[in-house]
Amino acid sequence: MHPTPTPARSAYARALAAACNTIGPAIEQAFAAVPREAFLPPPPWRMPSADGDEITSDPDDLHRDRLVAIDPSRGLNNGAPSLWAGVYDALAIQPGQRVAHLGCGAGYYSAILAELVGTSGRVTAVEIDPSLADRARSNLRDWSHVEVRPGSAIDHPREPVDVIIVNAGATRIHAGWLEALTPGGSLYVPLTSSPKDPEGEALGIGIGPGVVLRHSAPDGIEARTLDVVGIYPLVGARSREEDAAIHRALSRGAEAARRVASYRTDVHPESPECWLHLHDSCLSYRRLEGGSA
């Protein structure tokens, strides 16, 4: 099984708890329990930042709130721990829950999720890149309640789950994700707009807010936005038209995004109560009767 927390991992988890303010002891303990270096290529490791990359071969250096490169040639990183700690707190993940982790990479955050749900729960980790899926399966062998599946995030999960976490940027909320959620279940997905080349093709990392949806009101789906993130695009889950709509929504500013309260799938004309309006769905400022959004 995974080793006892080291002083460096324990300090790292305490620092995450302090940085995120609201995360509880279960999330802190999960980050302390999982050795980050076990989910990375062999050293030396590269930690990219706007101030310049840092190179290290010391595992203790990895236990900070920093990106760590998994494949620098493709811009693939082990993401920011404080971002995902905050997401898991917002989703209120509990022991015994079934979680689908879509876009699991090499499996580090799948292991964190496995710690949160415990052996009475279940994590299904999905990765479209076959080589990364193989690495995740090997890396997660000590967590018997995690299943790694190769494949596309838009084709999963294939069974009911309590929580879905999409670990890449999409331009829409796919109906299959919501259909797989149990009553009261929650979905997190970053909705991102990508920079474009002169021909209109997406370039690199997309920018946009994380969105949490919850089946918790009798007449619809509650929604709220979390912080804006920069994240790798989700293969097969993007369109230029939807990307442009997200860009327009983001141009209204952060305060407008924070007012989002519900997700609608009824066809309706765009109106001032729409934040992100697509032809068949909408993130809306309209509050739900009986909801808590």
Image: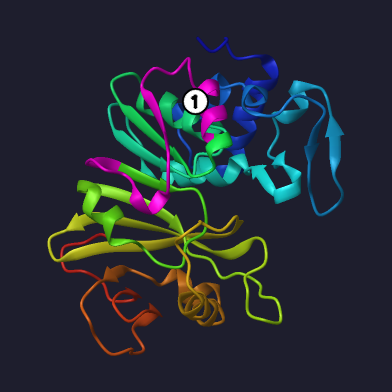
Vertically, is 62 above or below 217? Answer: above
Q: Nearer the viewer, residue 69 or 256?
A: 69
Instruction: Answer left or right for 21 relative to 175.
Output: right
Q: Quadrant of residue 273?
A: bottom left
Q: Nearer the viewer, residue 73 or 267?
A: 73
The boundaries of the magenta stretch are 133-162
Q: What colour scheme was applied to this rendering of the protein?
A: rainbow
Is residue 56 on the magenta stretch? no
Reading the image, the residue beneath label 1 is 137
Q: Amino acid at mark 1?
A: Arg
Say which element carries label 1: helix
Instruction: Answer left or right for 170 relative to 58.
Output: left
Image location of residue 122, percent across then percent down: 32, 28
Q: Nearer the viewer, residue 19 or 45?
A: 45
Q: Nearer the viewer, residue 36 or 22?
A: 36
Instruction: Answer left or right for 155 relative to 110.
Output: left
